[in-house]
Image (cartoon, rainbow, N blue to C red):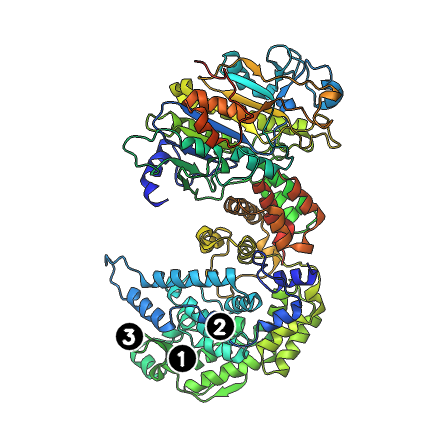
Amino acid sequence: MGAHMPKLSRRASLLGLGATFSLGRISLATAAAATEQRFVVILLRGALDGLSAVQPYGDPALTGLRGALALPEPGQPGGVLDLGGLHGLHPALAGMHTLYRANELAVVHAVAGHYRSRSHFDAQDYLESGADRRMNSGWLNRAAGLLPAKPGVAAGAEAALSVGTTVALLLRGPAPVGTWLPQSFGQPDPAIYRSLLALHRADPLTGPALAEGLKERGFTEAVLNGSEPPKDKYSFPALATAAGRLLGAPDGPRIAALEVGGWDTHAGQKGRLPGVLGTLDKGLMGLKDGLGSAWARTVVLVMTEFGRTVRVNGTNGTDHGTGGVAFVAGGAVAGGRVLGSWPGLAPDRLFENRDLMPTTDLRSVAKGLLTSHFRIDAGRLAGVFPDSADAPPMKGLLRT
Amino acid sequence: MDSNAAHALIRFGLGRRGAEPMPADPHAWLGRQLDGPDPALEAPCHSTAEGVRAVRTVQTRKAGDPTKENPVRDIYRADTATSIDTLLTTANPFRERLVWFWANHFTVSIRRPLVAGLVNAFVREAIRPHVTGRFSDMLLAVMRHPAMLFYLDNAQSVGPDSVAGRRRKVGLNENLARECLELHSVTPAARYTQADVTSFARVLTGWSISYDAANPGFLYRPFAHEPDAKTVMGQTYEGGEVEGERALAWLAAHPATLHNIATKLARHFIADTPPPAAVSRIEGVLRGTGGDLKAASLALLDIPEAWQPLTKLRTPFDYIIGVLRALDLPTTNRPDVAGLMAGLGQGLHNAPLPNGWPDTAPDWAAPEAMLRRIDWAYAVTGRTKDLDPLATADASLGPLLPAATREQIVRAGSKREAMTLLLAAPEFQRR
């Protein structure tokens, strides 16, 4: 990182973060540019179940397919938060519901990338590459490279900053990204601890040691099974707030990528989702708080690699699927709407008789946002999303 | 993949490096590593003489001297980097394991900070050449090395009735003599007495360090040597430098010493509680060959229990090296290994006491220690974006990867989570 050091230190103090800043389970990358517009991507690694986050409570086939995973209708105890008659937000997304009602959040349902892989690894690579193959750079980096350089800053001198042990592929590429490694190791998602606890359980030595260690660290059963977020001051909401402050500063960066895991709910989904959804909700609200008045010029895209199966599996969870949900939030967003064409859940409408049929290409959403927000024209967008002529920019996403 | 080959790479080696070729005949592959001189002796390393000069430079610096240069630190950093590189890349991992086993048996620790200038030279000059030689030669080389003489204070030990002792009112320091009996050779099982310790310390008086810039290194100081005859464990010594050599040769061949090192070798390579038959077998080889460490090391390979499922817990040292060999990261993308070892509780060359790092599972399986392994595994996966977790799992563990772990890796929510699950899995903790 060398020459970036003083700048990073200043930023660290701007963020109120010391040298021992630990990341927990998220990473943050940012890029500076000569624009007042802010753009943030929140990557939900592990595949969010779109039908739980935004439940089509008005679809007649829902309860038959989803059984116990279906939540009560709006207005009932524990019911979904209404989005206008057909869909409802999961009750853990109360903050996002407020944004929706203020026309600052739009939902894009039945969305998917162009690829049809059900492998997390491949799908995340393609999602971040913005292509049907793994590339050496991510679409957000290539988009950042198209923004006007900051005056007085040599090209490539300080375009991007990644906080964490790694730069997400999404923001890797020709636009330089500085990295700042936290001093401490950081900690994986509680779900990882839980998986390891299971793997080690049969070991007479390491099994009890892990269980005791987690207890000493204050990981309750509720935290490990995901129904409560971990008590971590470097949690996603805290870091998202810090990222907001960073982006909100007049001379701060303009592009950021954050990620949060814990979505791979193969088992016991009903108990695990509220914790992670609450984390996402608090994070988004924290980002808004941190941005302050810059929220008005901000667009946030929340996306995941694919949706999950429509039917419940044998362990009260869902498996890897296709169509899912994306969120677009921010003061610049023309929100208060559920976008995309709802394919329905009738048996003949499912993709391969198991998944939500995708009706919107996620690249169209991203292209629509980049076009309107940064005035990147179609010719240059082709370099950001190669071979995407079949996915024209979605119109009308932002206030004009 | 042959499960014996996978087993050999972990139990007797340092873990497979990336996708390096699997040995067709694991037993022969391990044995071949002990032929000829240690290739790692070719790697650059500051000499003992350079280390002693550096120690003197720092030692004689006056308080408040603003000089920033610290030759001891510079030597330590350079040579430690080399030794870590050897660990991560060696094609002779069995031999390397033996080097670190003996370096731990004969611990010199940088808890005495100036040892840092000498410790790598100590390993190179007193340990490496003798790993496949005779135990008596290693013991002698260790006891004459400035790192040991400094670490356990023998350099300042003066016979009370020697010329120097009568003149300066200085005297014995029993530290090295005691640890040599207790840890390096016969152990208290040989029922030596305090009188034996004191006598042995007298035998070793005069074994010291020359800081003379022209000829730095081991120096026998006759004026500091206790003149009279001494009796150690029933053996009488008549005086002079040679009596120390004779005493060490006698101790090296003592049955209790052979039992001690046979037990430690078997504990290190076979099981925390080694089977008595295995210990006897190694002991017998040592006895029959005059303490030939190559023969004893090869005999380990013939013990049936050595090929039973891996039950030893990797120490943090083994674990970090095993993980980094499996990942085989380019040199530009390697973490700070020495710092990591400290973070996981086993700082390099930094054992708290002369008995070195413990070698049984319960010593390393503390709850927070295990969690730190997981957290570090998670951290290091930040460097492995381009690696396929399942391919890494198959390469590093092969047939030792159980279905349950494999299933978790396949089902993980991201590459990084999958890699974390692999590196923190129970199978990766064992050797």
Residue A241 can be seen, yes or no: no
**Side (left or right) of B425 relative to B228:** right
- Rendered image quadrant of residue A326: top right
Q: Residue at x 38, y 69 (%)?
A: B46
Secondary element under disc 2, as helix, strand or loop, is: helix
Mark found first going from the N terminus, 1 or 2: 2
Which amino acid type is marked by label 1? Thr
- Which quadrant does the N terminus of chain A fall into? top left
Secondary element under disc 3, as helix, strand or loop, is: loop
Q: Residue at x 39, y 23 (%)?
A: A37
Secondary element under disc 1, as helix, strand or loop, is: loop
Chain ID of residue with mark 1? B
Question: Is residue B320 shown above or below A240?
Answer: below
Mark found first going from the N terminus, 2 or 3: 2
Q: Nearer the viewer, residue B288 or B29?
A: B29
Which amino acid type is marked by label 2? Ile
x, y percentage for residue A248?
A: 38, 25
x, y percentage for residue B70?
A: 31, 60
Total count of labels: 3
Say which residue label 3 marks: B213
Q: How packed is label 3: few (under 14 Cα within 10 Å), some, or many (20 or more)?
A: few
Chain ID of residue with mark 2? B
The residues tagged by marks 2 and 3 sit, at their Cα atoms, a distance apart of 25 Å
Q: Nearer the viewer, residue A247 or B343?
A: A247
Say which residue label 2 marks: B127
The residues tagged by marks 3 and 1 sit, at their Cα atoms, a distance apart of 23 Å
Q: Which mark is residue B205?
A: 1
Chain ID of residue with mark 3? B
Which amino acid type is marked by label 3? Ala
